[in-house]
């Protein structure tokens, strides 16, 4: 009886040791696989893309959109911020202060065809 008890105890100790070693090996293997996958994923994030492969999921919008010329000029135009600017009256121009030259007067005569200008003399070179 005592000999079989020692055998059972020894086999149970061996089984326990085997299961502990298997558990340790299994967890170590799983940790190393998980570490390898993590390193592979982080390295793939910094790796250049293959030739001819386009990533369609990437959105390529600018973070700060530049204004076009008219909107930029409108935003930068000088404002009437001083009271002298706000209360300024437009200048009054005297419209009849100048005389029109005679070629701008309208004639009452009927329209007559203008003679064609003579051709300029040919220059010899």
Image (cartoon, rainbow, N blue to C red):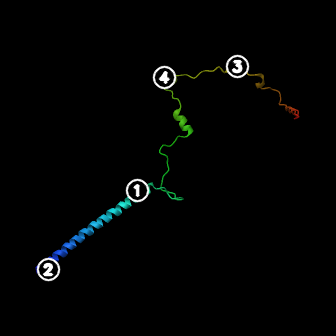
The answer to whether mark 2 and mark 1 are in CB contact below 8 A is no
If you read the primary sequence from the N terminus, does the residue marked by circle 4 or circle 1 appear first? 1
Q: As drawn, is 49 to the left or to the right of 13?
A: right
**Name of the residue lying farthest toward the left:** 1
Tell us which disc is closer to us: 4 or 3. 4
Q: Give the alpha-carbon distance from disc 2 to disc 1, as whole Å.
A: 56 Å
Q: Quadrant of the N terminus?
A: bottom left
Return the residue nearer the eye: 113 or 29: 29
Q: As drawn, is 101 to the left or to the right of 11?
A: right
Residue in the image at 37% along x and 61% along y: 36
> Is 36 located above or below residue 97 in the figure?
below
Return the residue nearer the eye: 38 or 21: 21
* Residue at mark 1: 42
Could you say which disc has been placed on residue 98 in the image?
3
Number of marks in picture: 4
* Residue at mark 2: 4
Q: As drawn, is 38 to the left or to the right of 10?
A: right
* Residue at mark 4: 83
Instruction: Pinpoint residue 124: horizontal percent, then vertical percent.
Output: 88, 34
If you read the primary sequence from the N terminus, does the residue marked by circle 2 or circle 3 appear first? 2
Q: As drawn, is 45 to the left or to the right of 25?
A: right
**Name of the residue lying farthest toward the bottom:** 1
């Amino acid at each position: 009886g005592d000999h079989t008890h020692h055998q059972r105890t020894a086999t149970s100790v061996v089984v326990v040791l085997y299961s502990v070693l298997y558990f340790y090996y299994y967890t170590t293997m799983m940790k190393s696989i998980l570490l390898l996958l993590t390193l592979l994923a982080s390295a793939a994030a910094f790796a250049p893309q293959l030739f001819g492969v386009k990533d369609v999921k990437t959105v390529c919008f600018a973070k700060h959109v530049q204004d076009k010329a008219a909107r930029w000029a409108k935003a930068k135009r000088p404002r009437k911020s001083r009271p002298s600017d706000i209360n300024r009256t437009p200048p009054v121009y005297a419209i009849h202060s100048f005389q029109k030259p005679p070629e701008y007067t309208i004639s009452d005569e009927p329209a007559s065809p203008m003679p064609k200008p003579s051709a300029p003399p040919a220059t010899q070179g």
